[in-house]
Image: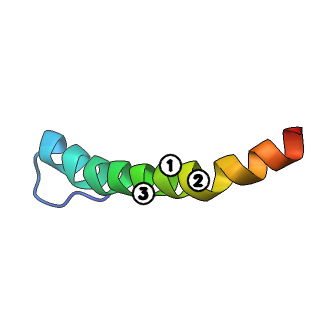
């Protein structure tokens, strides 16, 4: 764990927020294109 500013809560947010944004971005990309691909596979 890299300590940015000494406060473990702020460090956790510093890591968690970009991770959450990346996760949300990936989720929306998969939601648009992935659903069509998944539907084709299951049909």
- Callout 3: 10 Å neighbours few (<14), some, many (20+)? few
Residue 6 % position (x, y): 11, 52
Is 20 on the left-hand or right-hand side of 42?
left
Marks 3 and 2: CB-CB under 8 Å?
no
4 lies above or below 41: below
- Alpha carbon of mark 1 to alpha carbon of mark 2: how far? 5 Å
In front here: 18 or 31? 31
Marks 1 and 2: CB-CB under 8 Å?
yes
Provide the secondary structure element on which disc 1 rests: helix
In front here: 39 or 4? 39
- Alpha carbon of mark 1 to alpha carbon of mark 3: how far? 5 Å
- Residue visible at 50% across and 49% down in the picture: 27
Can residue 1 be seen here? no
35 lies above or below 29: above
Is 13 on the left-hand or right-hand side of 38?
left
Is 36 on the left-hand or right-hand side of 29?
right
Provide the secondary structure element on which disc 2 rests: helix
Is 34 on the left-hand or right-hand side of 32?
right
- Callout 2: 10 Å neighbours few (<14), some, many (20+)? some
Residue 15 % position (x, y): 29, 53
- Residue visible at 21% across and 54% down in the picture: 14
Instruction: Residue 27: give its label.
Output: 1
Provide the secondary structure element on which disc 3 rests: helix
Q: Which residue is the site of mark 2?
A: 30
Residue 12 % position (x, y): 24, 45
- Callout 1: 10 Å neighbours few (<14), some, many (20+)? few
Marks 1 and 3: CB-CB under 8 Å?
yes
- Residue visible at 87% across and 46% down in the picture: 41
- Alpha carbon of mark 3 to alpha carbon of mark 2: how far? 9 Å
Q: Which residue is the site of mark 3?
A: 25
């Amino acid at each position: 764990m890299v300590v940015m500013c000494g406060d473990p809560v702020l460090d956790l947010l510093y890591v968690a927020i970009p991770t959450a944004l990346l996760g949300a971005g990936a989720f929306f990309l998969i939601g648009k294109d992935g659903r069509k691909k998944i539907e084709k596979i299951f049909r």
